[in-house]
Image (tube, helix red, strand yellow):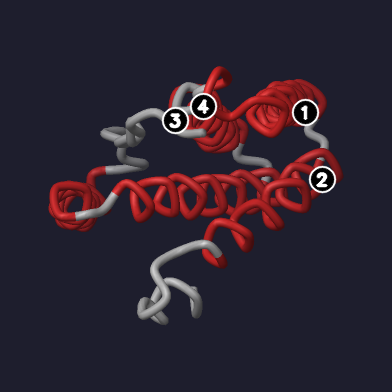
Amino acid sequence: MFAPAAVYRSTAHANAGSSAAGAYRQIGVETGVAVASPHQLVLMLFDGFNEAVAQASAALQLGQIEARGRAIGRAASIVDDGLKAALDVKAGGKLAEDLKALYTYVTLRLTQANLHSDAAALDECKRLMEPLRAAWVGIGPAGNTATRTQ
């Protein structure tokens, strides 16, 4: 169902004070990507999506328009350039087609959330994606309990 996954890597940093922490985190992400299985890469995309949506929600509440836009853009990129691009519709059949349609809808709702400062749309996107993450964790390697607790 999935072709090799591409992982979104954020290079934007909110301010100079967080650039060192951001660089350290980026190295950690790159190291994780280098040693991750295809299953773990997709899980990293789901986790990155959740983090970006949480950042967007916080920025929305604080009235930080630029930060909200960056975070929503990152979430949309993870969905479009990561999860949706990794789908193999031929091999995945109806399930992959349904996921593609869901990812398209989530990207639309993210765009609407950004345009209209709509916290409910962000919440909807998170609610739609969470069962997919949980299912993905559920089909993971049987002995890997670390990914199940996140």
Structural crowding at the residue carrying mark 2, measured as other residues with C-alpha within 10 Å and reported as few (<14), some (14–19) or many (≥20): some
Q: Separation of disc 2 and disc 3 at Cα?
A: 20 Å
Q: Separation of disc 2 and disc 1 at Cα?
A: 8 Å
User: Which residue is at a point 39% across and 28% down the rendered structure image?
Assistant: 3
Amino acid on which the number 4 mark rests in the picture: Leu
Structural crowding at the residue carrying mark 4, measured as other residues with C-alpha within 10 Å and reported as few (<14), some (14–19) or many (≥20): many
Q: Is residue 112 above or below residue 126?
A: above
What count of labels does the image hold? 4
Q: Which mark is residue 109?
A: 1
Q: Which mark is residue 82?
A: 3
Ranked by sequence position, the earlier of labels 2 and 3 is 3
Q: Which mark is residue 46?
A: none
Ranked by sequence position, the earlier of labels 1 and 3 is 3
Helix, strand or loop at mark 4:
loop
Q: Which residue is mark 2?
A: 124
Q: Is residue 22 above or below residue 146?
A: above
Please state which of the two labelled residues, at mark 1 or mark 3, is closer to the viewer. Answer: 3
Q: Separation of disc 2 and disc 4 at Cα?
A: 22 Å
User: Which residue is at a point 36% across and 34% down the rendered structure image?
Assistant: 5
Frontmost residue, 64 versus 148: 148
Helix, strand or loop at mark 3:
helix
Q: Can residue 17 be seen at all in this image of the molecule?
A: no
Amino acid on which the number 3 mark rests in the picture: Gly
Amino acid on which the number 2 mark rests in the picture: Glu
Helix, strand or loop at mark 2:
helix
Frontmost residue, 142 versus 52: 142
Ranked by sequence position, the earlier of labels 2 and 4 is 4
Ranked by sequence position, the earlier of labels 2 and 1 is 1
Please state which of the two labelled residues, at mark 4 or mark 1, is closer to the viewer. Answer: 4
Instruction: State yes or no: discs 2 and 4 in contact (Cβ < 8 Å).
Output: no
Q: Which residue is mark 4?
A: 87
User: Which residue is at a point 65% across and 25% down the rendered structure image?
Assistant: 93
